[in-house]
Image (cartoon, rainbow, N blue to C red):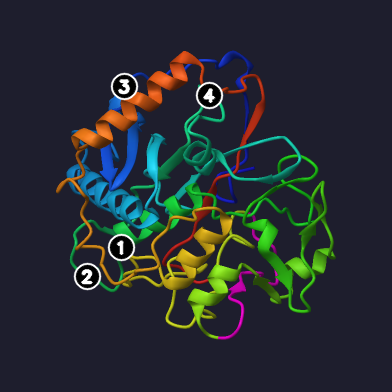
Amino acid sequence: MAPEVGVVEKIDTAGQKAWGYGQPDEQVVGRRLVFNLYFTDIRENSHVGFANDAPFSAAARARLREVLIYMGETLNEWGTLDVLVKRSEMDGGGFSAYAGTYYTASAGFQEGAALYRLRHWAKQSPGVPDMFLMVDFGNIYNFSTDAPGPFQEDFASLLLRVLTHGLGFVSLIGETGESIIEPNVYSAWDRHLVRGDGLALIAGRAPAFQGQAEDLTGGDLWFNGSRAFRLYGQGVKPRVHAPSRFRAGESLSHWAPGAIEGGAVMEAVTPLGSVRREWSAVDIGALADIGYMRISDDITGGWEGGMGCAGNGAMDAWTSFQNALHEILLTLGLFMVMAGRRFLNAGRKSKIGVAS
């Protein structure tokens, strides 16, 4: 697909049996979760985006660090995630950014590479990143921690939103109901999508689409996760974005805009000039339902108040030891990693600051 309508990238991992990116360009720690960052702009000396000599690079990387620290603090996970930051765009067209994770082609409800690594203490494929991110720096952003102007996108809010897709907050359902990857391959998020009458969209031991194509564009889809329902606290399920025209990379992977009481990071539209730097209760509930069971229900700490357990996002001694032990165990082969599978990148470009 074209980038502006979602990203589906097939990767043959048969020849990728080892990590080929070397040492990270930066490490960020939120509580006990280590994010290894690999900046393509730095490695290719692109002079744009996150490159060392690019305009706004220092501020952009500072906001990225802060968002990752907040995510780690709130997810309450421990482990390591490799994040590939792809070469930045500068055209200012289409969507502002996209992020995602990788899925195998095996039938079932897939966790995605990020959650898989945290749950199994091993990478799904040794040579593939756990998450990826791309930003178009051709837009007008607020790179500061202050409130944005009325015509600015808040950069931290944008990063939090797209990186949440990288955790697996994403649908693999195409416009006909079939998987965009392979038959019977859907995401953990898809497991919880239901029609207004309660019918699960995807069900079965080999998960399959149970509805009609018009269900995907009728505006009557809901998220049936128990923790999202409880934390939302409105006595109804949160509504999922199902606009009248199916939009690849947007439909089914967000909350319906304006339908979430109090607003949420993962709504399909975030107005220009607005700030959403913290997950709402319903965002947190959905992340718990898709598999982040250690996530904190406490959303009162605040984005600016959660700047990392080590003070600045650096690794403390215990986290460093855990990370080293993890890598040693992988090297010794105590955690079996199946190479040679085919992986599909199911990232989504996120539209922020524009009306549907």
User: Residue 72's spot in the image, x, y percent?
Assistant: 34, 50
Task: Point out which mark residue 147 bears.
Answer: 2
Q: Which residue is mark 4?
A: 335
Q: Which residues are magenta?
A: 235-248
Q: Are marks 2 and 1 in contact (CB under 8 Å)?
A: yes
Q: Quadrant of the N terminus?
A: top right
Q: Looking at the image, is mark 2 or mark 1 earlier in the sequence?
A: 2
The relative height of residue 123 versus residue 309 in the rendered view (above or below) is above
- Asked if the stretch drawn in magenta spans residue 21, the answer is no
Q: Residue at x 46, y 68 (%)?
A: 354
* Amino acid of disc 3: Gln
Q: Residue at x 65, y 19 (%)?
A: 340
Left or right placement of residue 119 versus residue 86 in this view: right
Q: Looking at the image, is mark 3 or mark 2 earlier in the sequence?
A: 3
Q: Looking at the image, is mark 4 or mark 2 earlier in the sequence?
A: 2
**Quadrant location of residue 20?**
top left
Q: Quadrant of the C terminus?
A: bottom right
Q: Which residue is mark 3?
A: 23
Left or right placement of residue 159 versus residue 107 in this view: left
User: Residue 157's spot in the image, x, y percent?
Assistant: 34, 61
Q: Nearer the viewer, mark 4 or mark 3?
A: 4
Q: Nearer the viewer, mark 3 or mark 2?
A: 3
* Amino acid of disc 1: Asp
